């Protein structure tokens, strides 16, 4: 018998939501590895493939039998098992039941006394038997953003499962899920090769499915689409780059891609590019072609599900539908541009931001005032006067336009477009667009000062508002995407790179809400939001810095300025293998250890209470050097500050700890010594980093 | 294939699939889902198969007859198959063939679209069916109606008749569709029948609607629905639920609702719909309890309980 075998599982479904397919395949892969491991079965490799109508897992090189497992079985107590060293019937009965011999017996010490025990081999089952048992549960564990029921058992999946093919080499593994029994039957392309087809073995499946006009491998399908798109785009003199997001969706709407070029009336090129692409992507999942300079051409590329040769009629239909959709967009555009953006602002009074947080009109006014605060902090008053106030007023007006009503993802984009048409300055228009940025992970960040300030103000206002009425994200539940908002705010603040006091900003944002916020949420509100923002910052810092202990040390210190935090993390990391850093760390760690257990005695030592010359000496050093170190810190020269701090105190602290007993009986003297060490500690840790959090590797400790 | 033939062809197809042919409901609705043959019958355990045409009104979709695809009123062919059989997609594709659409020569795709109606508290998972990139059918496995989890799951297939006819007749504009050959009296076009209506209704919805009146009507309909529910007359009560929904649609089209008001009104309609569904289910549970005790007199049993 072969010692390994290949397994193939095809979950045949009705058309799956495109976005769910690849995540489901990834889950299946890890579920397979997990299940095999848990069942003591080896497997060499798992390959997955997906189309709209099937999720396929191929497990290669699976062991055909479970690995042996020895288990210790405890029998009767020693006193019962043996009578004068002779085995009793109790022991013999136990051995018989376990299939073990007298020579297998061991004595085991347990908390309850001595017992006999034997090691028995658990029966190793054939893999096919085990797998048939675990596969149904495994299919049921695949998670989708949304799942449904369709038959009486109440089983949930993204769409109904209609067939299951499950082969173990040439054999069928039999099981059932949601009233569907597994077999060796599969189905091909809905139209071009519907089937059913019988599959003789794992290897033959791939030939059968190919003949049934299905490109099984989603990577291969995507490659085909991209190459053909490039060829067609070139033939039209167009930019050959394809929209990567849309192609992922379209790839999972077809089992056999066929691409063709179509056209539309040049008149529609008057519509903004984003309107064209949004309408095309959302309504028909087709691609706008642009020339190499990025200017839209009246041409598109459509991808269909392998219609035999995509007739002229199919193309004409696509073009006709596009015409109707674009004429609708034109209708919206014309309706919207009948009045100026400015005239739409009062309509925002009727549009709710959040029921308890008031209208979008109120939000706009708060954001405008918060923007003024930020501009003040950053000393960019010219930006403020010229563009910021105007952009703040107009920033939400596009939310009441028809176009944004139809395509919500065009918020900001339409605002910019309409502002330019109204004759607003390009800076104002850009700031309106930019204040929504970043809209998703990896999105671009605002580039203009006005856009950056508005983006921060808008997000901070949202965070304070929702936290202020207790709508705080928990676990994966974040219906208002506050994490994304916070992540965005942090990203913009860091990109701008100027100092900004979070607590001042958040207090101001809170004050602007007046009594709209819950009384019970108000105490410590801005602190809660700072913590929330810091959590986002940590994920950003973790991407660029693998020293989590340094991040932790910095965040345990002054944390009111995100830009400053980032700077400190970077500088300390760069410094972390130097002697200066090690010295500073030692000073902080040693002082930390001694002051940790002490109460809150303050950190102003009284020189009159000093008894040892070393106390005086340390205090002298502290007094003469503290200003210098302070100045370095205030100038944000953290590298120099750290080195200077370490150099200043390293020797003095060592001698001090060698010679001076801190924990003496006399409370006054003890307290005073602790206060002295606390002063030394706080000089650095209050403002730079609590280096006692640094993890020191064993080698470094020597 | 002329419009009237499309209706008879698809109806005959579903009749052959065991559906009985229903008639449209006579109160203004936004979709065939609002018809009692769908709203009530997908609740509870009993099997149900029906197909019917439902004239539907969507005031906000009006474009003064200038858009070739969007209108404020149109015709749906609604099919309910309960419980949903495993080959329902195949049956559907055969219905397209029956109507004269060659699925081999066109790009027919099932594109994810999860349908929900917040006013009815209804929702399901399924697709828009695209024919060469135009949505011609909404295909839904109902999971909920009136907020109640459904078991068995019904399949709802809603054909956009105008759009299918446009393909079949090769007309780029729905107002140019041929409704009937007219038996020798010349062609009767969709536009002859409905273009003037379309323009007048758009003018009414967007320019002449009286939001204050609609608001008042909404309140009156709501009050009547509640009163009837108190009398356990859930069927007439449901008519008034539909009327509140239509008033709501008119208010929405006139652009006079703020987001909060909108949400609040939708919530009120949903509450009424839920009331009707609950009474329907309660009554049917009682009836099936009665049918399991064939000797008992149902009136007497009700009086006693």
Image (spheres, coloured by chain):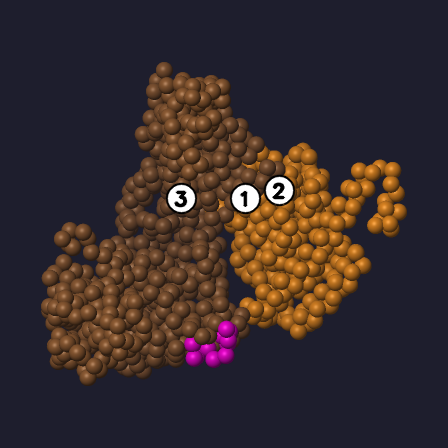
Chain colours: A brown, B orange
Residue A32 sits above or below residue A281 on the image = above
Residue A140: horizontal and vertical position, in percent?
A: 49, 38
Residue at figure coordinates x 53%, y 33% from the top left? A177
* SS type, badge 3: helix
Residue on which disc 2 sits: B153
Is residue B6 visible to the viewer in this orientation of the structure? no
Instruction: Please tell me how crowded label 2 is: few (under 14), some (14-19), or many (20+) other residues with Cα within 10 Å.
Output: many
Instruction: Return the chain for callout 2.
Output: B
Q: Quadrant of the N terminus of chain B?
A: top right
Residue span colored magenta? A510-520
What kind of element bears circle 2? loop
Q: Are marks 3 and 1 on the same chain?
A: yes
Tag 3: Cα neighbours inside 10 Å, few (<14), some, or many (≥20)?
Answer: some
Circle 1 SS class: loop
Q: Mark 1 sits on what residue?
A: A148
Residues marked 2 and 1, same chain:
no
Report whether residue B120 is seen: yes
Q: Relative to residue A271, is residue A18 depicted above or below?
A: above
Q: Horizontal placement of B290 versus A157: left or right?
A: right
Label 2, label 1: how many angstroms apart (C-alpha)? 10 Å
Whether label 3 touches label 1, CB < 8 Å = no
Q: Is residue B18 left or right of residue A16?
A: right
Can residue B30 be found in the magenta stretch? Answer: no
Q: Is residue A516 magenta?
A: yes
């Amino acid at each position: 018998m072969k010692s390994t075998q290949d397994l193939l599982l095809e979950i045949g479904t009705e058309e799956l939501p495109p976005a769910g397919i690849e995540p489901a395949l990834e889950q299946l892969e890890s579920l397979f590895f997990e299940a095999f491991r848990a069942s003591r079965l080896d497997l060499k490799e798992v390959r997955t493939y997906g189309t709209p109508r099937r999720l396929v897992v191929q497990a290669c090189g699976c062991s055909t039998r479970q690995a042996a497992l020895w288990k210790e079985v405890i029998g009767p107590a020693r006193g019962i098992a043996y009578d004068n060293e002779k085995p009793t019937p109790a022991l013999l009965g136990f051995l018989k039941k376990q299939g073990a011999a007298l020579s297998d017996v061991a004595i085991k010490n347990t908390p309850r006394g001595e017992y006999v025990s034997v090691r028995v081999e658990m029966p190793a089952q054939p893999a096919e038997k085990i797998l048939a048992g675990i596969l149904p549960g495994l299919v049921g564990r695949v998670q989708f953003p949304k799942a449904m029921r369709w038959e009486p058992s109440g089983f949930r999946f993204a769409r109904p499962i209609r067939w299951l093919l499950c082969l173990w080499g040439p054999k069928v593994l039999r099981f059932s899920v949601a009233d569907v029994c597994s077999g060796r039957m599969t189905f091909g392309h809905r139209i071009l090769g519907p089937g059913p087809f019988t599959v003789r073995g794992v290897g033959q499946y791939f030939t059968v499915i190919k003949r049934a006009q299905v490109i099984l491998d989603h990577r291969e399908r995507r490659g085909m689409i991209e190459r053909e798109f490039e060829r067609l785009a070139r033939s039209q003199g167009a930019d050959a780059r394809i929209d990567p997001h849309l192609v992922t969706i379209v790839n999972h709407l077809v089992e056999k891609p066929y691409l063709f070029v179509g056209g539309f009336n040049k008149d529609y090129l008057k519509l903004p590019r984003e309107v064209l692409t949004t309408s095309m992507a959302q309504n028909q999942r087709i691609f706008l072609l642009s020339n190499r300079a990025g200017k839209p051409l009246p041409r598109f590329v459509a991808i269909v599900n392998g219609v035999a040769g995509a007739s002229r009629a199919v193309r004409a239909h696509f073009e006709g539908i596009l015409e109707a959709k674009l004429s609708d967009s034109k209708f919206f555009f014309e309706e919207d541009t009948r009045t100026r953006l400015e005239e739409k602002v009062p309509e925002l009074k009727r549009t709710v931001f959040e029921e308890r947080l008031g209208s979008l009109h109120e939000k706009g006014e708060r954001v405008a005032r918060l923007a003024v605060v930020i501009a003040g902090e950053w000393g960019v008053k010219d930006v403020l006067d010229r563009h910021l106030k105007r952009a703040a007023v107009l920033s939400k007006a596009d939310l009441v336009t028809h176009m944004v009503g139809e395509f919500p993802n065009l918020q900001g984009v339409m605002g910019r477009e309409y502002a330019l048409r109204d004759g607003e300055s390009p800076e104002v228009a850009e700031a309106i667009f930019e204040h929504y940025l970043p809209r998703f992970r990896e999105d671009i960040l605002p580039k203009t000062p006005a856009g950056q300030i508005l983006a921060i103000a808008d997000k901070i206002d949202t965070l304070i508002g929702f936290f202020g009425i207790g709508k705080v994200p928990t676990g994966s539940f974040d219906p208002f995407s506050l994490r994304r908002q916070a992540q965005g705010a942090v990203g913009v603040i860091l990109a701008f790179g100027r100092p900004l006091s979070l607590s001042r900003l958040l207090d101001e944002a809170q004050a602007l809400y007046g009594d709209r916020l819950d009384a019970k949420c108000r105490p410590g509100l801005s602190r809660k939001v700072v913590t929330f923002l810091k959590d986002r910052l940590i994920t950003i810092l973790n991407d660029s810095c693998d020293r989590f202990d340094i991040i932790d040390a910095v965040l345990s210190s002054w944390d009111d300025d995100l830009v400053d935090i980032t700077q400190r993390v970077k500088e300390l990391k760069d410094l972390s293998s130097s002697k200066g850093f090690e010295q500073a760390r030692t000073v902080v760690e040693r002082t930390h250890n001694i002051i940790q257990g002490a109460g809150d005695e303050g950190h102003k030592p009284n020189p009159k209470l000093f008894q040892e010359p070393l106390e005086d000496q340390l205090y002298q050093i502290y007094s003469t050097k503290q200003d210098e170190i302070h100045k370095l810190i205030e100038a944000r020269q953290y590298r120099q500050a750290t080195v200077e701090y370490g150099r200043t105190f390293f020797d003095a602290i060592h001698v001090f700890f060698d010679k001076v007993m801190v924990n003496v009986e006399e409370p006054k003297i003890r307290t005073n010594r602790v206060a002295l060490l606390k002063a030394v500690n706080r000089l650095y840790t209050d403002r730079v980093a609590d280096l006692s959090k640094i993890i020191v590797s064993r080698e470094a400790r020597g | 294939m002329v419009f009237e033939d499309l209706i008879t062809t698809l109806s005959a197809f579903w009749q052959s699939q065991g559906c009985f042919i229903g008639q449209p409901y006579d109160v203004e609705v936004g979709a065939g889902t609002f018809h009692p043959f769908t709203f009530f019958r997908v609740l509870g355990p009993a099997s149900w198969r029906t197909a019917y045409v439902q004239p539907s009104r969507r005031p906000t979709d009006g474009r003064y007859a200038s858009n070739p695809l969007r209108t404020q009123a149109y015709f749906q062919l609604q099919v309910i198959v309960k419980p949903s059989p495993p080959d329902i997609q195949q049956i559907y594709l055969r219905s397209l063939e029956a109507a004269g659409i060659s699925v081999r020569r066109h790009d027919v795709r099932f594109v994810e679209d999860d349908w929900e109606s917040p006013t009815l508290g209804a929702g399901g998972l399924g697709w828009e069916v695209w024919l060469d990139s135009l949505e011609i059918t909404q295909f839904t496995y109902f999971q909920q109606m009136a907020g109640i989890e459904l078991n068995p799951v019904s399949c709802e297939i809603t054909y956009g008749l105008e759009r299918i006819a446009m393909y079949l007749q090769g007309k780029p504009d729905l107002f140019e569709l041929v409704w009937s050959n007219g038996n020798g009296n010349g062609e009767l076009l969709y536009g002859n029948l409905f273009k003037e209506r379309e323009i007048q209704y758009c003018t009414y919805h967007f320019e002449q609607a009286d939001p204050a009146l609609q608001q008042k009507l909404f309140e009156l309909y709501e009050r009547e629905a509640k009163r009837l529910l108190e009398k356990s007359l859930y069927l007439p009560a449901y008519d008034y639920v539909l009327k509140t929904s239509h008033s709501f649609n008119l208010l929405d089209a006139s652009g006079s609702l703020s987001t909060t008001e909108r949400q609040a009104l939708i919530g009120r309609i949903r509450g009424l719909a839920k009331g009707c569904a609950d009474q329907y289910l309660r009554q049917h549970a009682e009836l099936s309890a009665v049918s399991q005790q064939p000797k008992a007199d149902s009136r007497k049993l009700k009086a006693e309980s």
